[in-house]
Image (cartoon, rainbow, N blue to C red):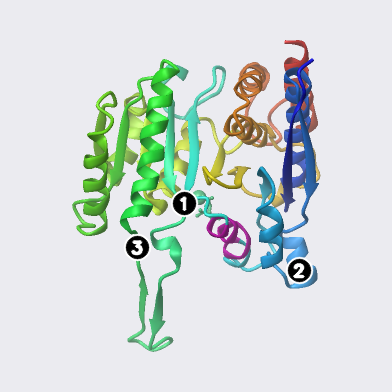
Amino acid sequence: MVEKNRYRIAVIPGDGTGPEVVREGIKVLEAAGEKHGISYDFTEFDFGGEHYLKTGETLPDSAIDDLRKFRAIFLGAIGHPDVAPGILETGILLKLRFALDQYINLRPVKLYPGVDTPLKGKKPEDIDFIVIRENTGGVYTGNGGTTRKGTPYEVAVQVMVYDRQMVDRCLKYAFEMAVERKKEGKPGNLTLVHKTNVLTYVGDLWFRAFTEMAKNYPGIKTDYNHIDAATMWTVKNPEWYDVMVTSNMFGDIITDLGAMVQGGMGIAAGGNINPAGTSMFEPIGGSAPKYTGKNVINPLAAIEAGRMMLKHLGEDAAARSIESAVAVACTRLKSLSAGKMGYSTSGVGDMVSGHIING
Ligand code: IPM
Ligand code: MN
């Protein structure tokens, strides 16, 4: 037997149902590892709402230095009902994205056979695209401020910041993704989504950078949509999209729409990617506190996050095994929603790992 590929993975189970779904994600990663000669060295970190309430600490800089040393991070969910909005989001999730320069947020939108989509008449062949969301710039940089606070003349400014290299590196990733997908037999089309009719500076920067880069990729068909139109077409004609690239906030919005189109938060996963550093993979549904500890939450999103992590690590065969097993699970589950699956959380994990080992 060939020597095992071994990966050091940091695990942040986080809050609410995070630990439950992470457990099933790891179960499935282990099964894929057993089948394909991969092993892992998992190290758990307890950051999240509970840790913050106990210690007042979100994510110390020393933890960033530790996390940087891992090949990847597997994240459950961050969010706690007793912590004011914004603290954990900026103190943990956004801090990690920024500090580790995870400048790509990769969010596949794929309808598995057997899954219900709210889009009438649309089939798995119609819904299979990937959104590349710029992940460290734009209005998320926190550039801005408030003056005259609390007065009737209060002014608040929050600036959409992009420089050319931030735009270029994101677009490059998107073009390469289109090339990759074309090799896999997918259309390999790339659509830039922005708002050039109003954002005449930032939109113009993205549009020019996109048009110039397109010249280096003559095999890739490109298109441009305004964000408002893109939300419309995602509902009406999702089959038009293959790879979509967009800035941070537009990507945030369109990927929630994408998650619903592919069957809901039960299956939606994302990767925060630094192509030259430590990337982080997560189910995008949040901590779902009301389902905590009930063994009813759908772990498929976390399992999908694990699949994306393996693909990112170059373990294509293992990632494909997970994909086939998830596809089978999707035809067995009565629904993807928590409590309505006809299976428990651990039952779904067992089913998927069983298919990997025996399938
Ligand atoms: C997401 C989330 C985050 C974002 C929040 C929690 C800061 O909505 O991952 O999409 O806006 O990026
Ligand atoms: Mn979001």
Q: CA distance from mark 1 to mark 3?
A: 13 Å
Question: In the displayed image of the protein, which residue is found farthest to the top?
Answer: 359
Q: Nearer the viewer, residue 334 or 50?
A: 50
Numbered range of the magenta stretch: 89-99
Looking at the image, is mark 2 or mark 3 nearer the viewer? 3
Residue matched to label 3: 160
Is residue 44 part of the magenta span, yes or no? no
Q: Residues within 10 Å of mark 2 (few under 14, many from 20)?
A: few
Q: Is 70 placed above or below 357 here?
A: below
Decide if residue 50 is on the left or right side of residue 208: right
- Residue 30, x across and y down, in percent: 78, 28
Number of other residues with Cα within 10 Å of mark 1, as a class: few under 14, some 14 to 19, many 20 or more: many
Quarter holding the N terminus is top right
* Mark number displayed over residue 135: 1
Please name whichever residue, 187 or 35, is drawn nearer the observer in this view of the structure.
35
Residue 169, x across and y down, in percent: 39, 46
Mark 1 or mark 3, which has the lower sequence index? 1
Q: Residue at x 44, y 40 (%)?
A: 257
Question: Is the CB of the residue bearing disc 1 within 8 angstroms of ligand 1?
Answer: yes
Give whichever of 248, 331 is nearer the camera: 248
Position of residue 65 relative to residue 126, above or below, is below
Looking at the image, residue 83 sits to the left or right of residue 100; the answer is: right
Residue depicted at 33% across the width and 59% down the height: 163
Residue on which disc 2 sits = 53
Query: Which residue lies at the image location 41% right of the left edge and 39% below the top edge?
Result: 173
